[in-house]
Amino acid sequence: MVKKIAVLGSTGSIGRQTLQVIAAYPERFRLVALSSYRDVGRLAQQARSFKPSQVAIADQSLYHELKRELADSGVKVLAGEEGLCRMAGQSGAELVVNAMVGFAGLKPTLSALSTGISLALANKESLVAGGHLVMPLAAKTGAQVIPVDSEHSAVFQCLQGQDSHAVEQIILTASGGPFFGLSGASLDNVTPEQTLAHPTWRMGAKITVDSATMMNKGLEVIEARWLFSLPYDRIRVLIQRESIIHSMVEFRDGAVLAQLGAPDMRIPIQYALTYPERLSSSVSRVDWLTLGALNFAAPDQENFPCLDLAYRAGQVAGSMPAALNAANEEAVRLFLERRISFRSIPRIIDEVMNKHKLVSSPELEELVETDREARAKAREAAVRKG
Amino acid sequence: MVKKIAVLGSTGSIGRQTLQVIAAYPERFRLVALSSYRDVGRLAQQARSFKPSQVAIADQSLYHELKRELADSGVKVLAGEEGLCRMAGQSGAELVVNAMVGFAGLKPTLSALSTGISLALANKESLVAGGHLVMPLAAKTGAQVIPVDSEHSAVFQCLQGQDSHAVEQIILTASGGPFFGLSGASLDNVTPEQTLAHPTWRMGAKITVDSATMMNKGLEVIEARWLFSLPYDRIRVLIQRESIIHSMVEFRDGAVLAQLGAPDMRIPIQYALTYPERLSSSVSRVDWLTLGALNFAAPDQENFPCLDLAYRAGQVAGSMPAALNAANEEAVRLFLERRISFRSIPRIIDEVMNKHKLVSSPELEELVETDREARAKAREAAVRKG
């Protein structure tokens, strides 16, 4: 009955919350492997607390530091992309939680699935860039891909026990982020600090910026296309300001199913770990009376063009979503470093997409090349646009 | 692939909409039996149109009139309670839709289930008065009870494919009816016409009055107790003014599933007929942007005491819910005949409940006796309270 779990990206926001859920059910879960990009201190601390059999640090240069931290702990230490991928596929885990941030999550995703290990997927870039590799691989090895993103978990929950042929459309909800309602020049001077103050969710920095630009929703649209095998014209985005409705499925008989709850990632994380069961949780419940209302609005495509860029990249397909994603990762980093403005983010992505040499069915190495090139082009564009 | 269906109460609001759904899918459904309380004209017309093998008229005195109407049609004509029950159990239908109004629906429900025929149940009084007979009988014969009420259909849809041990509570939504927000003396002089002008749903007269008094929700709470085997303290009522969220299920992990849709009974009716499949429907879709918001409020227990009366009757159990229901049916009739005021409805029910001699595990005949007595007491109380 004890499920053995590996957590990739255990020191980030989703990773830490995953460990909270695991810690709450010691009789149900055993953590066998952990990894971090470069947070040696926290990773070592997690390892001492959970006693996994192995840990990996993605930044190769930190291998010795981590090794020293865990001397005499009996924990095996791996490092670099190769170490990480080895851990993803061969830690003995029955479920790999991929909570890494960015394109770097794709290779470990493929490693886990290729050995038939099911995946709780929080790394949306795995599907955005490599959905055409990830989903067929999962189908081939019989591994499950269970979404962790609150929106996709909501859709996944709504689809359980339902007639899968009967889905008319998926409605992904979005809070709209901290700048919803602002327009034009008032967006010119928004700061990283303002951008990181999300109205409803506490998340990592990258995804919080993506949420403010609406790129997060764009990436989720592409993710949904792969998870639920629907064409883009049947994946819609709706602003739901309170972040209580996490997404909806509309069926061809006119019925709609929605999953709701407090904006707390521990709900979808726990569901991914316990699926198809549901265990008790002490997360706060929605107080419908205090809430009072759930408000809807249309996404503002004019002032937040990232959503349309993502639809466009998804429809072009091939290597274009990987280019979009890489340009976005780079632009967000530059914005957080105060080297470009908020509104330069979509401009840079648009320019990179326009210059991208499309590969129609890219293999993994072609995606890696697309990622490298798009980042370089984004940096070039940033110098010009600032 | 053609499902043979009997519709009891085919001339009422739910019955007519059921026939619309059946007519839309001639390759999927065949109507084999129909019944009405006393609407000979419409019943005969439906029979000529759908060509069932038998029809029944509940009011025995109308047998000859119906027989005459259907002379040379080849349709077998039955009459009276006995004819109706025979039809419910022996029409050759695979599914009986019980769309009758009131306590009279209980016996045909039992007839269908006792022969193992599954039931699409819109007659809530079957469960309110006789849930302790209906559900064990269904379990014994293996017949399914599929709810048609929009709220219970919503819960039923939300529970598909879910961990049934994990339900924390059911939240039945209520529009609040035409008088939500009114209080005290302003409710003294409301007329039947005002009462019948429901803000969101078009329904028959009895249920529309019940919706205005909140007794409809009270009956639904008792119905939910039987359909979903939950104690009353885990069945909650929430005002959802727009009648778009049809009900919700809260699970122990903090996740909530809700079923939403336009307030159109053809959605739950069709689902009950096609379950577990979903066929296309041309009912209107929810336009989230025009809708703008979903509003919640607490039920007003002080000014609309019928909901609490129903919880009380449900918790007392035994014959009390049958007494509540009978007193309510009688009070609603008297209100529609302008013989009592709107606010006398709960007063009369309360008095009947207080005088009721409880039978703790009533058999069918004891329920019939409870029903008869409670109606008589309601009429007596009405004379005094007017």
Image: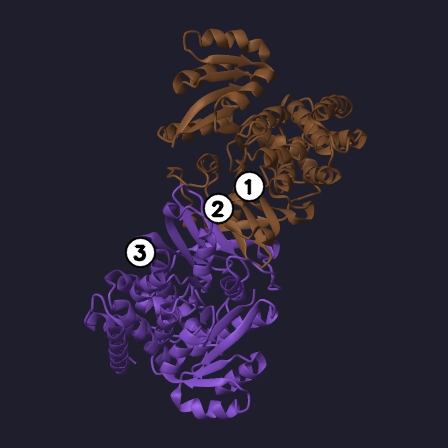
Chain colours: A purple, B brown
The answer for which chain carries disc 1 is B
Count the marks: 3
Disc 1 element? helix
The residue positioned 52% from the left and 21% from the top of the image is B90
Residue kind at label 2, given as amino acid type? Leu
**Disc 3 target residue:** A232
Real-space CA distance between mark 1 and mark 2, rounded to the nearest whole angstrom: 10 Å
- In the image, A95 versus B48, the foreground residue is A95
Position of B176 with respect to A205 (left or right) is right
**Disc 2 target residue:** B260
Real-space CA distance between mark 3 and mark 2, rounded to the nearest whole angstrom: 23 Å
**Mark 1 or mark 2: which comes first in sequence?**
1
The residue positioned 40% from the left and 74% from the top of the image is A89
Q: Tell me where residue B321 sits by quadrant.
A: top right
Q: Is residue B195 in sight in this rendering?
A: no
* Position of B16 relative to A291 (above/below): above
Residue kind at label 3, given as amino acid type? Tyr
Disc 3 element? helix
Quick one: quadrant of the C terminus of chain B? top right
Same chain, labels 1 and 3:
no
**Disc 1 target residue:** B151
